[in-house]
Image (cartoon, helix red, strand yellow):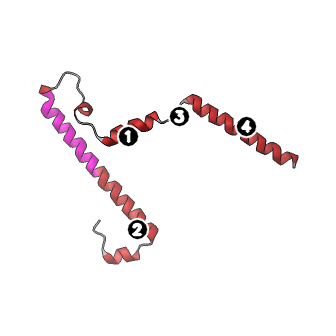
Amino acid sequence: MQLPLKEFYNYTPRQFQNYTTGFMESRDNKLKSDLYNTRWISYWAAIGFLKKGTKPEQLISFPWEEESDQELKLMPTEEEVQKARDFWKEIDKKREHGKTSS
């Protein structure tokens, strides 16, 4: 992180946490960018040996791409969202009813 000692001592714990988080995210984004560039170069270097229609993602896949696909699968369906809305509307009605009867 190359943080000067004098600056380190001036940070509150929260400021240091924010600085560290930002630094780590920046480093990860740079690494991902470099790996995407490497995949793209590898794809074009191998294009003559690949089957027609092969995509760069099929040549080299990254763990964070699979995680994002799994996150999409975890998204609730429209039906599940509507059930949750109906549930909370009922809860709100019961609470409002309890307030007016008191």
Q: Are marks 3 and 4 in contact (CB under 8 Å)?
A: no
Q: Which residue is mark 2?
A: 16
The residue nearer to you, when weighing 83 against 25, is: 83
Q: Residue at x 23, y 23 (%)?
A: 53
Marks 1 and 2, the one that precedes in the sequence: 2
C-alpha span from label 3 to label 1: 16 Å
Quadrant hosting residue 81: top right
Element type where label 1 sits in the image: helix
C-alpha span from label 2 to label 3: 36 Å
Quadrant hosting residue 46: top left
| Residue type, numbered disc 3 | Pro
Crowdedness near tag 4: few (<14), some (14–19) or many (≥20) residues, C-alpha within 10 Å = few
Q: Residue at x 42, y 64 (%)?
A: 17
Q: Which residue is mark 3?
A: 76
Indicate left or right for 81 with 60 as reference.
right
Residue interval drawn in magenta: 30-48
Indicate left or right for 91 with 6 as reference.
right
Q: Which residue is mark 1?
A: 67
Crowdedness near tag 2: few (<14), some (14–19) or many (≥20) residues, C-alpha within 10 Å = some
- Spot occupied by residue 5 in the image (x, y as percentages of width and height): 32, 76
Whether residue 45 is in magenta: the answer is yes
| Residue type, numbered disc 1 | Glu
- Spot occupied by residue 57 in the image (x, y as percentages of width and height): 27, 33
